[in-house]
Image: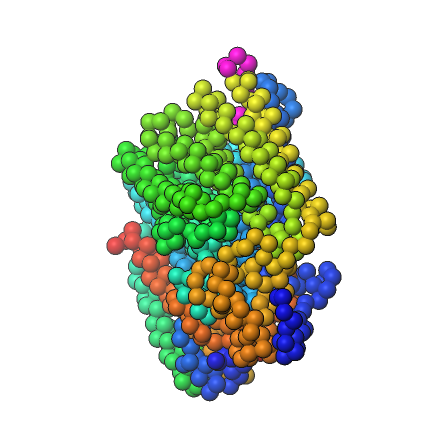
Amino acid sequence: MTRSTEATSAVSASYAARRRVSLPVGTWGVILLVATEIAFFGTLISSYLYLRLKVSHWPPPGIEPPDVTAPLILTAILVATSVPIFLAVRAARATHVRRAWLLLLVALIAQAVYLGVQIHLFSSDLDKFQPTDNAYGSIYFTMLFAHHVHVLVGILMIGWLLARLLGGLTNYRLVAVQVVAIYWYFVNAVAIAIVLTQVSPSL
Amino acid sequence: MATMPAPLGRQRTERLERIWAEPSGVVGWLTTVDHKRIGLMFFFTSLVFFAAGGVEALLIRTQLLHANSGLLSPGAFDEAMTMHGVTMIFLFVIPMSIGAFGNYLLPLMIGARDMAFPRMNALSFWIYVASGLFVYTGLAIGSAPNAGWFDYLPLGSKQFSPGPNIDFYTLGLIFNGISSTATAVNLVVTTFKLRAPGMALNRMPLFCYAMLATSFALVFALPPLNTALIFLELDRALGFHFFDVAQGGDTLLWQHLFWIFGHPEVYIIILPAFGIATAIIPTFTRRKMVAFPLVALAEVLVAFIGFGVWAHHMFAVGLNTVTTVYFAAASLIIVIPSGIQLFAWITTIVTGTPRFKTPLLWIVGFIVLFLLGGLSGVTFAAIPFDQQLTDTYYVVAHFHYVIFGAAVFPLLGGMYYWFPKVTGRMYYERVGQASFWLTFVGMNLTFFPMHIVGLLGMPRRQYTYPHGLGWDGYNLVESIGSYLLAAGLLMVVANLAMSLFRGARAGNDPFGGDTLEWSTSSPPPPYNYAVIPRVTSPYAMWDREDREADQRDLAGPAERVLDEGHETPASSVLDADWDEILEMPSKSWSPILLAATLAAGFTMLLTRHYVVAGTLALLALLVVGGWHWKEPQEA
């Protein structure tokens, strides 16, 4: 029987991970977190569509339809960070801690750039119209804000991982790498749904 | 435990005692991560809120005792009515059923030593306490929520409710939702991963299926509520327009989101009660549950179908006919899994050898009341009938039969049933039976006449009513019934409180129980089981050979005792094969600190200090980061 929590080196953590016959407790935890978050974003997007179908002009007169190019390119960048994250999980499981660290750093930089540009776009949108103008503004900004907060939390989690991995790999940290990866796959999948909803009036 | 443990066995139990000991006194309770202590804290706290909700109910009934009563002002009546609903749903039934019963019993029933995330469990409790205090602060400063527990718009909007009353409701319930979600996630992962090796899914007690289904429903039902609450708070605090028709918003959006949560919520409330019924019935009928797999499936199905019926709360708001008919049909389908369970309970009792002790009496009462509440519920699927009776006392009668009769009766039966396990003492049997009859009579006197006054047209949510409409007599009976009901509940509390000090010693298994928790001592030790139990059927306690093997294993292989650390086994999800040994976290200050930080954050949102609230949110994230800094093997 593996005492996996006692695995405090990259080799023993990797061994514990390979010995497991089912997903560890932490992974199930994040799967359920993601499940409840999917219900949350599902509700946000449904509310957007519900409000949209109630009116004849969406966005209302006086507000330009949303720009398509910039959000789509940004989302592509964010979704692409799934690749280094996926590779980082594989590297960590294969005891290559240094490689995993660098891959996570690559993802972190791309995500930080994404968030920076998105914040800029968010504030320039605010110059054009306000969430207090009408229901379109309310749901538009609320939906985007909710997603940006999730990106920020994900970035903080990767920052935490980078700090912890400097001290080497343990079973706990290896599970954490997988947990953060699952969170990010979810954030990236939601990014696609959000951006398509966001630009839908211009399509 | 008739025989003395062998010397090796004694050494091992002593070592386990040392490893699992927690600090004594107040500090021990503040930092505890033991699911049993957390369960007890949930129990006592939710009892306090039950009392508060009960006082509010008695105020309502006293106000309606006779026509044109002036006991409560219209405004005070609205607050009492709203706080009664909010308290009973969010601060009593959910914390009592999943927080107290789920937390205390589920790990015991599956042979685990703790929940999967013990510190998150503690966090969930402290958030629950803080959110309850948050909502009740509104009452204390004279601004209690007052737009009903459903808080319909536009009444709940800034325009029509300018005070902070509704802000206590929105922020308090968002805060409370964090607690329910955390407990639900914890229960699911615990059920999936911490079952004693050998307890494959088909050997899991039905109680655990009910808890699993409830927890899944919570995971998916709370986000729509939270979204609605966030929208409403943004509307109220920052002038957004989600529910403002003039600016493209829609008041019905609130009702949709609220009832997408609200209807699954009904099953979230009632499923743990079903689980308790399926735990009590086999014990007192000396017979395994009839149709075990069907009942397990029905429990899960009820939780699932519950998500597709929300608009039957909205038949009178002007949805189109196709939508209404769809939801009426979906609502009828729920009768099937509910019926399966009802027939299974009745058949088990009838074909067994029932001993009508106090716990089983409550369950029989529950079956009767659930049948009545279920039948009146079916009538609402007839759309024209629903449109006539919506917003009358007929609806109040129906959902109190379901929520009080069907959800709270098993909770009370469960209190009697597990009291000997939790305290090591027996309750007084005759007083217990008397308390059942008093409550049962009081319950029916209170709520049955409501069907009739509802059919006579008495509207609900009104602070008073005029003479001469033929309602006076019924209302008098209802109010008298409510006092009897309260007396019955006080009798339950008095019985248990007296028994705590004077009750006879109960021993491990006073009833010949069917599930694992009866195999350990009463009250259970901090590590629950010295030997990780063998499980070969869902009625583990009735497998005598397995239990005897457990006794022998105390001096057997170390793997079945795990006395080298704060450990519990994790197993695979379906077949429960041995997977790994987990080092569980022990006492921690992080949960209560995090809950306090969040409470401060929500208070800042209430007082509109958004920068401070944002800073506190970041601080909370820092606490979470620190929480995960220390790893299990370093503890």
| Residue drawn at (48%, 85%) of the image | A12
Picture coordinates of residue B152, whole percent (x, y): 47, 36
Q: Examine the structure image and report whether residue B463 is included in the region drawn in magenta.
A: yes
The residue closer to the viewer here, A37 or B302, is: B302
| Residue drawn at (37%, 51%) of the image | B291
Picture coordinates of residue B40, whole percent (x, y): 63, 54
The residue closer to the viewer here, A36 or B623, is: A36
| Residue drawn at (49%, 27%) of the image | B448
Q: Examine the structure image and report whether residue A165 is included in the region drawn in magenta.
A: no
| Residue drawn at (32%, 68%) of the image | A76
Vertical position of residue B595 compared to residue B193: above or below: above
Q: Is residue B30 left or right of residue A118?
A: right
Vertical position of residue B607 compared to residue B26: above or below: above
Colour mapping: rainbow
Stretch in magenta? B461-470
Q: Is residue B444 visible?
A: yes
The residue closer to the viewer here, B289 or A138, is: B289
In which quadrant of the rendered image does the C terminus of chain A lie?
bottom left
Q: Is residue B608 visible?
A: no
Instruction: Name the chief secondary structure element in magenta.
Output: loop
Q: Is residue B135 left or right of residue A91?
A: right
Vertical position of residue B68 compared to residue B175: above or below: above
The residue closer to the viewer here, B112 or A83, is: B112
Picture coordinates of residue B292, whole percent (x, y): 39, 53
What is the total number of numbered labels drawn onto the structure image? 0
